[in-house]
Image (spheres, rainbow, N blue to C red):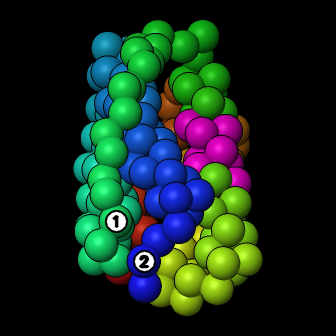
């Protein structure tokens, strides 16, 4: 099940996007740590690990179908935001961008009838539905509680619920 050059390039680009997501979330972790929001810092540290795992999954998939893995340059990321809300909005925008990228790669796989890539990518479409829902929940918790106060408790409850579902 050899990859076409087009599909291989798209999958390699996704590795870079996943690595950049990890780097972005590391920057957000630092922001929340410096602003005194330890639960949010922990949340983004965990998401950094998850994005690195995703990058590894894409790398492994490319290798399993006898493709060539390429690592691209990562750009710097912010560690300062106008507010916690602004940081969470940036994270949500980033997740939506990742979702759109995965869907566009899936469309290539469907067009090329690369069924193994289709199956692999569909798991990531499902993953992105969960990710966007999680980020919406965190944003809603902050909106309802305000950027100060009970938002920490609500985030803890959301994260506890998230881990119970795994």
**Relative to 104, 27 lies left or right:** left
Q: Secondary structure at mark 2?
A: loop
**Relative to 102, 39 lies left or right:** left
Residue 80 is inside the magenta segment: no
The local crowd at label 1, few if under 14, some if 14 to 19, many if 20 or more residues have their Cα within 10 Å, is many
Can residue 28 be seen? yes
Image quadrant occupied by the C terminus = bottom left
The local crowd at label 2, few if under 14, some if 14 to 19, many if 20 or more residues have their Cα within 10 Å, is few
- The answer to which of 91 and 106 lies nearer the viewer is 106
Q: Is 146 rendered above or below residue 113?
A: above
User: Going from the N terminus, do you reach mark 1 or mark 2 first?
Assistant: 2
Badge number at residue 67: 1
- The answer to which of 91 and 62 lies nearer the viewer is 62
Q: Quadrant of residue 39?
A: top left
Image quadrant occupied by the N terminus = bottom left
Q: Is 90 rendered above or below residue 19?
A: above
Kindly identify which residue carries mark 2: 2
C-beta proximity under 8 Å, tags 1 and 2: yes
| Magenta-highlighted residues | 91-100
């Amino acid at each position: 099940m050899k990859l076409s050059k087009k599909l291989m390039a798209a999958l390699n680009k996704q590795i870079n996007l996943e690595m950049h997501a990890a780097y972005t979330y590391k920057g957000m972790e630092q922001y929340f740590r410096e602003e005194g929001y330890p639960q949010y810092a922990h949340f983004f540290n965990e998401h950094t690990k998850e994005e690195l795992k995703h990058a590894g999954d894409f790398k492994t998939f490319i290798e399993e179908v006898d493709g060539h893995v390429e690592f691209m340059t990562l750009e710097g990321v912010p560690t300062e935001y106008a507010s916690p809300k602004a940081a969470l909005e940036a994270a949500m925008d980033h997740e939506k961008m990742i979702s759109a990228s995965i869907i566009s790669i899936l469309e290539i796989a469907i067009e090329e009838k690369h069924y193994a890539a289709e199956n692999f990518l569909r798991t990531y479409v499902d993953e992105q539905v969960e990710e966007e829902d999680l980020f919406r929940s965190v944003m809603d918790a902050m909106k309802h509680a305000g950027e100060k106060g009970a938002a920490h408790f609500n985030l803890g409850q959301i994260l506890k619920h998230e881990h119970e579902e795994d």
